[in-house]
């Protein structure tokens, strides 16, 4: 039945762990829409025939419309809340990767995709992932807003300049699956294509080992020193001009607005690009903006370096 619906709607293969659940919700919503449309048509046809006027017909009694309206509104509200609950649960799940997920940094720019793996290896156009293992994708952009879209995985997430967004997936079938940009980004938008190449875990391990590069966290440490970050931030837990980086990643940070935020990839990237956006209690707003001088891969490497200095478990 699943394959029948998929072919009727011209959907690509279900190649990720979340594709089946997303399609099931899709089928339910479309099926309900068609059912409601058919019932509405039949109801209109019945009313036109049953309550039509004529010389030999008595005026019809007034229908209890308010009862019918309340019933239909109630059913519609229940269906909306049910679908919203299911959809939000799926949205939440794809943004909360399991422990041990492979982290791949993705930088979008006009008009290509660049991928950086945990061992520092980088590639363009093709994202290689092992089958059966969760992969967390951390997205940013060098220029304008792009959108990382893999139809076969049923996943789509915007890549925004100066910020990091994320999602995760587990490839379930071997093969090459298209990566498209789903946000118009300029004259070369239609050519901004790539592939997710899902392969056996052993083949992936061989590919990674043959593309050994400087460790991403190690590169981030060198960049932090080169850009002068360590003049204000310590790595041993001592507070200085800025917050210490020891144990900062995933910690809870108090802002001058009274808000408490989690120091995740998005927050740390924003702090580098727009440090005045979220001011931390107890520290002066003296940090300069690195927007335009720090590239997306460089920001990702520094975030990975901060992560390597200790991770505090964020509360659920």
Image (tube, helix red, strand yellow):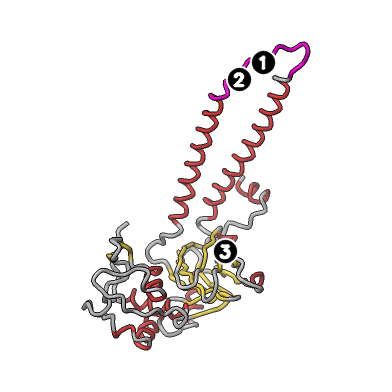
Q: Quadrant of the N terminus?
A: top right
Q: Measured along the vertical axis of the image, is residue 82 above or below residue 66?
A: below
Relative placement, left or right, of 255 versus 18 is: left
- In depth, the one of 86 and 234 nearer the eye is 234
Tell me the mark number nearer the camera, choosing from 3 and 1: 1
Q: Quadrant of the C terminus?
A: bottom left
Tell me the mark number nearer the camera, choosing from 2 and 3: 2
- Look at the numbered disc 1 and give the secondary structure of its residue: loop
The residue carrying pointer 2 sits among few (fewer than 14), some (14 to 19) or many (20 or more) residues within 10 Å by Cα, namely: few
**On the image, numbered disc 1 is attached to which residue?**
60
Give the extent of the magenta segment.
Answer: 53-66
- Look at the numbered disc 2 and give the secondary structure of its residue: loop
**On the image, numbered disc 3 is attached to which residue?**
149
Image quadrant assignment for residue 256: bottom left
Asked whether the residues under the numbered discs 2 and 3 touch, taking CB atoms below 8 Å apart as contact, a structural biologist would say: no
> Measuring 52% from the left and 28% from the top, which residue is drawn there?
70
Q: Is residue 60 magenta?
A: yes
Residue 202 visible in the displayed image: no
Query: Residue 252, image x and y in percent?
Result: 28, 64
């Amino acid at each position: 039945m699943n394959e029948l619906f998929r072919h009727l709607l011209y959907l690509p293969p279900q190649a990720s762990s979340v594709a089946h659940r997303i399609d099931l919700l899709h089928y339910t919503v479309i099926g309900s829409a068609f059912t409601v449309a058919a019932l509405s048509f039949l109801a209109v046809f019945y009313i036109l025939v049953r309550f039509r006027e004529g010389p030999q017909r008595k005026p019809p009694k007034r229908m209890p419309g308010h009862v019918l309206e309340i019933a239909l509104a109630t059913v519609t509200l229940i269906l909306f809340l049910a679908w919203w609950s299911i959809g939000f649960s799926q949205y939440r799940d794809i943004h909360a990767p399991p422990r041990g997920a492979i982290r791949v940094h993705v930088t979008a720019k006009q008009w290509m995709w660049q991928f950086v793996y945990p061992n520092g290896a980088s590639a363009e156009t093709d994202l290689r992932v092992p089958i059966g293992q969760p992969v967390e994708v951390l997205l940013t952009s060098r220029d304008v807003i792009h959108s990382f879209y893999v139809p076969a995985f049923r996943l789509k997430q915007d890549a925004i300049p100066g910020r990091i967004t994320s999602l995760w997936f587990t490839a379930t079938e071997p093969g090459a699956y298209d990566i498209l940009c789903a946000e118009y980004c300029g004259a070369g938008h239609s050519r901004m294509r790539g592939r997710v190449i899902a392969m056996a875990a052993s083949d992936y391990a061989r590919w990674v080992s043959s593309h050994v590069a400087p460790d991403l966290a190690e590169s981030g440490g060198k960049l932090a020193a080169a850009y002068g970050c360590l003049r204000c931030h310590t790595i041993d837990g001592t507070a200085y001009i800025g917050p210490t980086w020891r144990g900062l990643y995933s910690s809870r940070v108090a802002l001058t607005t009274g808000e408490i935020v989690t120091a995740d990839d998005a927050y740390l990237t924003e702090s580098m690009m727009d440090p005045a956006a979220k001011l931390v209690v107890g520290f002066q707003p003296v940090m300069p903006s690195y927007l335009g001088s720090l590239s997306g891969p460089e920001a990702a490497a520094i975030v990975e370096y901060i992560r390597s200095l200790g991770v505090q478990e964020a509360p659920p």
